[in-house]
Image (cartoon, rainbow, N blue to C red):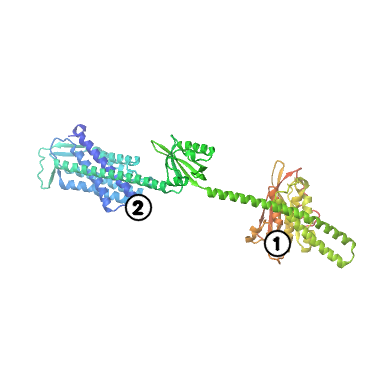
Amino acid sequence: MQLNLEHYNVLLVLFSVAIAFLSCFTAVDLTDRMIRRPKGYLYLILTSSVLGIGMWSMHFTGMMAMRVGFPVSYDLPLLIFSLAVPVLASYMLFGMYNNPRTCNRAYLGFGGILFSGGMLIMHYSGVMAMRFSAVYEQSLSSVVWSILFSLIIPFVTASYSPAWLQKPYNMFSVKKIILVLILTASLTGTHYTAMSGASFVNAENGDYTGIIPMLSDSLLGVILGGDFVLIAALVVVLLYRDRQRVIFSARFNEQRYMALFEYSPDMVACIDPVSQKVISANPSLRETIGYSMEELLDYSSLLCTTEDESALRGAVERASAGESTKLELTLRTKEGRRLICSTTVFPLANEKHTAVYIVSEDITSLAEYQQQLILAKEEAESAVRMKSEFLATMSYEIRTPLNGIIGINQLLAEEIGDEEQLELLQLQSSSSQALLNVINDILDISRLEADAMQLYKEPFELPGLLAECMSLFEVIASDKELKFTLQVSPAIPEVLIGDCARIRQILVNLIGNAVKFTPAGEIRVTVEGDGAEDDIQTVQFRVTDTGIGIAPDKLQLLFQPFSQLDASHNRKYPGTGLGLAICKKLVELMEGEIWVESPPGGGAAFIFRISLQSLGLPSEQGTGCEEGTVTGMNSKAV
């Protein structure tokens, strides 16, 4: 007799599918818990027993659903063997999931293959355990199809990814339900495709006469019913524990929220955005403001200005739409004090209701302190401006009589012929000039700090300016036997528009420092173009020397007023320490930049870059100043 749909009890078939679904669901859920936190051997035995007994119960429930037309009994040893095989196969697979070293796709895929083999052994050994008065035959195609259905399981086990654990545990997640349905289809598909190719031919004498104990069909039904009750009870227990976990988590979150609400030092209020009334307020708000809960129902009465009231209402409306807002409000206490508060307004929504929370922090002391800092800063800046103005005024007052002294000194030097008196006059003249230079520096830095210096733009010839600056140090360079070199790029126009006097002042300061700090060697002045746009030419000046250089730990002292690398009273190189500070401020006033570099061979290189307006095209022959040549000067040591 070939089995077909008419030879099955449909209710028992559905019952077998339900057993398979519950078994797979329980096993998958227990495996999910086990992967998140490795378990012990008892947990492994429980999980493997649930899946193994469920598979076995599904199989023999499907066998009992067959209407073969003759009594069936079962060989008890084979029956026990068919039960032990799926339990052991499940234990082996779950052991791989429980071990971090084997919980990967290669091991789990191999474990799935072994599990499929155990499922097939369970099925066919269960069929072989049947004892009836008929001859059992199995078609080859049904065996192949049952093997193919069983091989779905290795693909499922090998699809495991640690990324699944990044999401929190969920007993009824979509991915888990899909896995359960696939496993259920694999188990039931393996059984019923195999049984679709089974046939039972009546034998003349099919009575069993052996000595092996047999199990009746009715007793097996009782055992299978007990298995179903056991698996169903386990599912109920898991559902109950998951429900308890959810309730505990909800209670804990509620207690945590209430603790934060009650004991928060910030002022917290919950508002209904529909009625615009305060639902609840924490003790910190009531104690700070001084109002009772009934008096706090209309929160707009706490605000000092209509602007704050309008801003808060707008923030509440945005929060009811799901947008949080930060703003600063001024609150009025019951005693009449004003509090400046940093306030955050944000929503808390669920499917049925939306509430708006207002969290405020009292920053009155901080705001007052910041205001005091602003006033102190303004006073300090005013004092600095007054000092600079005073120094500028005093510098003018001192420089005027000093110029008179220098002029009278020059007149006396022309009339007096006594060498001793002339020497004294020369000493007095050099001292006056040194004092005048100091006063000029102080005047310049004071005007720069007071923003009182203005630039005067006029056309000038760059080659003539460079030659003039270098000729000032011709005598000193000759005394030190220094090599004085000027190099100008031919691409730079000869005539530029800018503040010629301030550019000369920067160059004189930088070249003077190079001459001062270079006992022997070379001083090179290089002028290059650094790009041009329309009629604006960017010019880069570089003054390089082979002098004493600058220590790396002293670089931060450069370009600071009254700062010197050697601050001792008996220093070798005198000066006020204002030259580089003036250069920096002048360059910044021209919207340029200045910096210093340390060449590999020693010495120092000061570079500044400014933008000047071009007047005319560059000469084809350049400025007449090639490398190694200075206008009016020879390139050799002078």
Q: Please tell me whether mark 1 sits on a helix, a strand or a loop.
A: loop
Q: Which residue is mark 2?
A: 100
Across and down, in percent, residue 609 comes to 69, 50
Kind of residue indicated by mark 2: Pro
Query: From what the image shows, is residue 188 above or below residue 408?
Result: above
Q: In this rendered view, identify the residue nearer to me: 134 or 579.
A: 579
Counting residues from the N terminus, which is met first, the one under dot 2 or under dot 1?
2
Which class describes the residues within 10 Å of circle 1: few (<14), some (14-19), or many (20+)?
Answer: many
Residue 346 in the image, given as x and y percentages of width and height:
46, 41
- The location of residue 219, given as percent across then percent down, is 14, 42
Task: Give the label on residue 547, or none.
Answer: 1
Secondary element at image label 2:
loop
Q: Is residue 408 left or right of residue 29?
A: right
- Residue type of the residue flagged with mark 1: Gly
Q: For the view shown, which residue lies furthest in the front direction?
A: 335
How many numbered callouts? 2
Residue 410 position, x and y percent, is 86, 59
Left of 35 or right of it: where is 502?
right
Answer above or below: position of 317 versus 212. above
